[in-house]
Image (spheres, grey):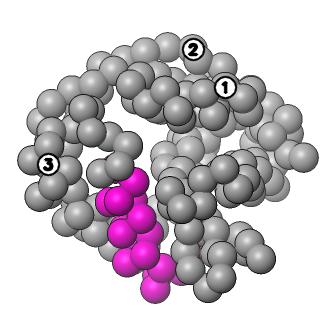
Amino acid sequence: MLEMRPAIFDDYPAIANLHTISWQQHYRGIFSKYFLNNQVERNRWVLWHRRMSVPLENQRVTVAIHDHALVGFACLFLDDDPVFGSLLDNLHVAASHHGLGIGRSLIETCARQLLSSNTSKLYLWVFEKNEKAKSFYERLGGIHVENIETKLEDGSSAVSCRYVWHDVSNLIR
């Protein structure tokens, strides 16, 4: 059985681990090999410790739990941008659980959070080279509106694509 719930502080190690593994699996050729092999784990642990110990007022983190294990998470920042709305900053699902609808369920949970906060616009950034993720967001009705050059944690840069949903009610089944 799949459970969606708000993240708690004690979830941060599992979130950081999943985030690290996901980057190592999906971002080869985007980040440097050295960064992914030697630095990303600490980078993600520091990020998630900070996010969960001193959360921003507009931050919402949802975790997906299956058989008592954290198998996915989403991090949303409400009303992040005056034009594009709320930012879905992270959405990751364990590779062992891809194709089971967990990513879709996480996005739907985020959409419900937005609607309960009286906002309906959502956007996210995805690396141009991440074809699988772009395809997923397009299947969910995301509209690709722009590309920008993004400075990465390892000092390199990559093209990021902004996807938007003007009405998140369309994400709710």
Q: Looking at the picture, does residue 30 appear above or below residue 48? A: above
The amino acid pointed to by label 3 is Phe
Q: Residue furthest top?
A: 146
Residue 125 in sight: yes
Q: Which residue is mark 1?
A: 138
From the viewer's perspective, tell me whether residue 49 is left or right of residue 52.
Answer: left
Residue 161 pos. (x, y %): 46, 22
The amino acid pointed to by label 1 is Glu
Residue 113 in sight: no
Does the magenta-highlighted stretch encompass residue 16? yes
Mark nearer the N terminus (2 vs 1):
1
Residue 135 image-quadrant placement: top right
Q: Which residue is mark 3?
A: 35
Does the magenta-highlighted stretch encompass residue 29? no
The amino acid pointed to by label 2 is Val
* Nearer the observer, 83 or 147: 147
Mark nearer the N terminus (2 vs 3):
3
Identify the residue at image location x=36%, y=69%.
Answer: 17
The overriding secondary structure of the stretch rendered in magenta is helix
Residue 106 pos. (x, y %): 68, 56
In the picture, the disc for residue 145 is: 2
Q: For the N terminus, give its image quadrant.
A: bottom right
CB under 8 Å between callouts 3 and 1?
no
- Distance (Cα) linking label 2 and label 1: 12 Å
